[in-house]
Image (spheres, rainbow, N blue to C red):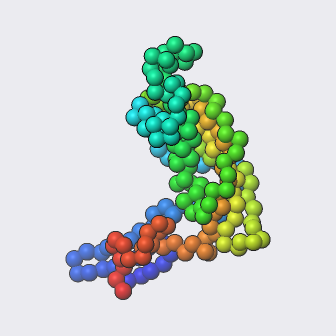
Amino acid sequence: MTDNDDTTTESDESTDKQIVSGWHGRYYEDFEVGDVYKHPFGRTVTETDNVWMTNVTMNLNPMHFNEAYAAETEFGERLVDGTFVIALAVGMSVIDVSVNATANLGYDKIRHHNPVYHGDTIFAESEVLSKRELESRDHVGIVETELRAYNQDGDLVLSLERTPMVLKREHAEPSAAQPPGWPEGIGTQPEE
């Protein structure tokens, strides 16, 4: 058996099995001011998404759930609840920005630039605006990003600034056998 930071190999008589490290997310040291991360996977917004979010949050604006009312507005149809668009874009950014965050310190300068409709596909990207170390906590740093979301036509629909507190690599100790979020001993394990 060989073991390093990225791969663990175990062998038996019939096959070689290898635990290969997957994406562990970025750590504080990985962020550079000016970097832009285009987050993978666009997501099409459905009517069900909108209805559930509107009901769960008790958003009583008829623009989101009353087709007859919305048809008489300047938009001519229901709009997707803006808080759903925020949650979706933030969720899309987690893979690149905050898998290793210990806290989100703030969401600022939130702007809805264009409406989102049922059937729109949303894409998101984040740009690193700043980063700084903390005197009071040596295991994390603060990273400020601007998150931007676009529809399938390239229209900017949302922008916001997001500030997570992100672990430093030396304090995370990720491994192929125990990536972020996995309890020790779950799933395939290297032989002892």
Looking at the picture, does residue 144 appear above or below residue 52? Answer: below
Give the tally of numbered discs: 0
Q: Residue furthest left?
A: 14
In which quadrant is the N terminus drawn?
bottom left
Looking at the picture, does residue 86 appear above or below residue 140? Answer: above
In the foreground, 123 or 34: 123
Question: Which residue corresponds to the image point at 54% horizontal and 59% vertical from the top-left?
Answer: 99
Q: Position of residue 26 (x, y in %)?
A: 59, 61
Question: Which residue corresponds to the image point at 39% horizontal and 34% vertical from the top-left?
Answer: 48
Does residue 22 appear left or right of residue 82 in this picture? left
Does residue 13 appear left or right of residue 44 in this picture? left
Does residue 94 appear left or right of residue 13 in this picture? right
Q: Position of residue 166 (x, y in %)?
A: 63, 63
In the foreground, 153 or 2: 153
Q: Position of residue 81 (x, y in %)?
A: 53, 33
Let me know if residue 60 appears in the view. yes
Q: Position of residue 178 (x, y in %)?
A: 45, 72
In which quadrant is the C terminus drawn?
bottom left
Let me know if residue 152 appears in the view. no
Q: Residue furthest right?
A: 135
Q: Residue furthest top?
A: 72
To which quarter of the image does residue 55 belong?
top left
Question: Which residue corresponds to the image point at 66% horizontal and 48% vertical from the top-left?
Answer: 107
In the foreground, 91 or 6: 91
Looking at the picture, does residue 119 appear above or below residue 93? Answer: above
Question: Which residue corresponds to the image point at 48% horizontal and 73% vertical from the top-left?
Answer: 175
